[in-house]
Image (cartoon, helix red, strand yellow):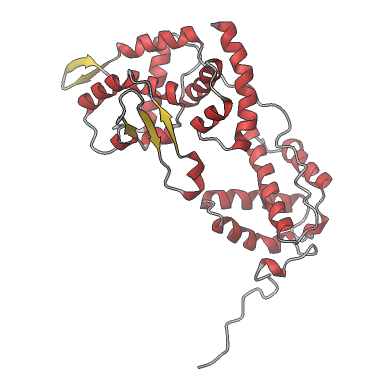
């Protein structure tokens, strides 16, 4: 058997993290960083996004720049260029993700002793405070519920009360679950072994989303509405028998019927849920777990929740 092995197309490329040092060029680290992200369970979408962000850094400095040349000041200059000098709009969401990319990338280099110090550790997560979310006031919630209770559907030429709008509105308002989580619900997601303490069992299929799995207590009175919905729609597997876009239309129609100026959305109801729980005296960490947020994400969310709660109390 021959022991001749095929030579790599680019022999200068490092084969492992052990081949990197502070003199390694940024471009020569990208393939290894991508492999690190995939091993960590990141999606292909995340890997592409992070790679794109680092290519922008290479565009700003030079792809041949040694990783040891990057300082906190240089990275701040890069972020300022993204916002003000590149000539392409940089949304707050994109800005925050790019800061995250830098933090993850340089932390990886530091933890593997390629760099002695992490230049991205001191980067601010974003350049300024994001605007507060819009939530429903107590009076708007009452108006929306009144509209949802009387909404109709027509099936085979016969009009009848549609139970889906009220079931959906109350479910999202009480639990704060996301749209994609709503679409994944099945009959097994509703645990009613104890009718006085029913709960919603939220599961996630991806390992990286394990912290988002949680149990959320339901209002026992909601079960009667849920049973009416099940009898009316008779779903086979997933509870929701329409598209996620149709759910958005339903929430919009509720808002229009209640003469609410801002369009009702899943995100609005999620924030409203958090604020109502906080005003009711629920412990902050309990709210965090209910929303399926990590401690890092909760830090900023909680600050906004407290500010929104002050407005909610004033309007009530």
Rendering quarter of residue 180: top left
Q: Residue at x 41, y 26 (%)?
A: 248
Q: Residue furthest bottom?
A: 1
Indicate whether 74 appears above or below 158. below
Q: Residue at x 60, y 11 (%)?
A: 311
Indicate whether 218 appears above or below 23. above
User: Would residue 298 appear left or right of 244 to someone viewing this image?
Assistant: right
Rendering quarter of residue 131: top right
User: Would residue 246 appear left or right of 79 to someone viewing this image?
Assistant: left
Number of callouts: 0
Indicate whether 240 appears above or below 152. below
User: Would residue 149 appear left or right of 110 to someone viewing this image?
Assistant: left
Q: Residue at x 43, y 14 (%)?
A: 255
Image x and y of residue 145, in percent: 38, 12
Image x and y of residue 154, in percent: 22, 19
User: Would residue 167 appear left or right of 154 to someone viewing this image?
Assistant: right
- Front-lying residue, 141 or 50: 141
Q: Residue at x 74, y 37 (%)?
A: 124
Indicate whether 264 appears above or below 6. above
Task: Determine if residue 65 is in view.
Answer: no
């Amino acid at each position: 058997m021959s022991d001749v092995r095929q030579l790599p197309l680019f022999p200068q490329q490092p084969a492992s993290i052990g081949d990197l040092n502070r003199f390694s060029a940024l471009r020569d680290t990208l393939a290894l960083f991508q492999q690190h992200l995939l091993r960590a369970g990141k999606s292909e979408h995340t890997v592409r996004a992070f790679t794109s962000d680092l290519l922008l850094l290479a565009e700003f400095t030079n792809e041949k720049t040694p990783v040891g040349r990057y300082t906190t000041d240089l990275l701040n200059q890069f972020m300022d260029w993204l916002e003000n000098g590149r000539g392409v709009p940089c949304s707050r969401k994109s800005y925050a993700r790019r800061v995250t990319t830098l933090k993850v990338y340089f932390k990886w280099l530091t933890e593997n002793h390629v760099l002695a110090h992490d230049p991205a550790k001191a980067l601010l997560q974003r350049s300024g405070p994001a605007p507060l979310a819009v939530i429903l006031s107590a009076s708007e919630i009452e108006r929306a519920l009144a509209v949802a209770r009387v909404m109709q559907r027509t099936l085979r030429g016969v009009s009848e009360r549609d139970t889906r709008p009220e079931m959906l509105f109350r479910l999202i308002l009480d639990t704060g679950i996301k749209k994609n989580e709503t679409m994944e619900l099945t009959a097994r997601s509703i645990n009613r072994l104890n009718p006085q303490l029913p709960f919603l069992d939220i599961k996630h299929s991806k390992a990286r989303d394990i912290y988002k799995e949680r149990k959320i207590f339901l209002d026992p009175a909601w079960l009667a509405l849920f049973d009416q919905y099940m009898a009316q729609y008779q779903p086979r597997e997933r509870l929701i028998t329409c598209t996620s876009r149709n759910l958005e239309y339903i929430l919009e129609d509720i808002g229009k019927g209640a003469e609410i100026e801002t369009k009702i959305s899943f995100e609005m109801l999620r924030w409203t849920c958090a604020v109502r729980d906080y005003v009711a005296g629920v412990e902050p960490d309990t709210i965090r777990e209910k929303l399926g947020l990590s401690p890092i994400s909760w830090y900023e969310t909680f600050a906004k929740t407290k500010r929104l709660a002050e407005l909610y109390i004033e309007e009530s």
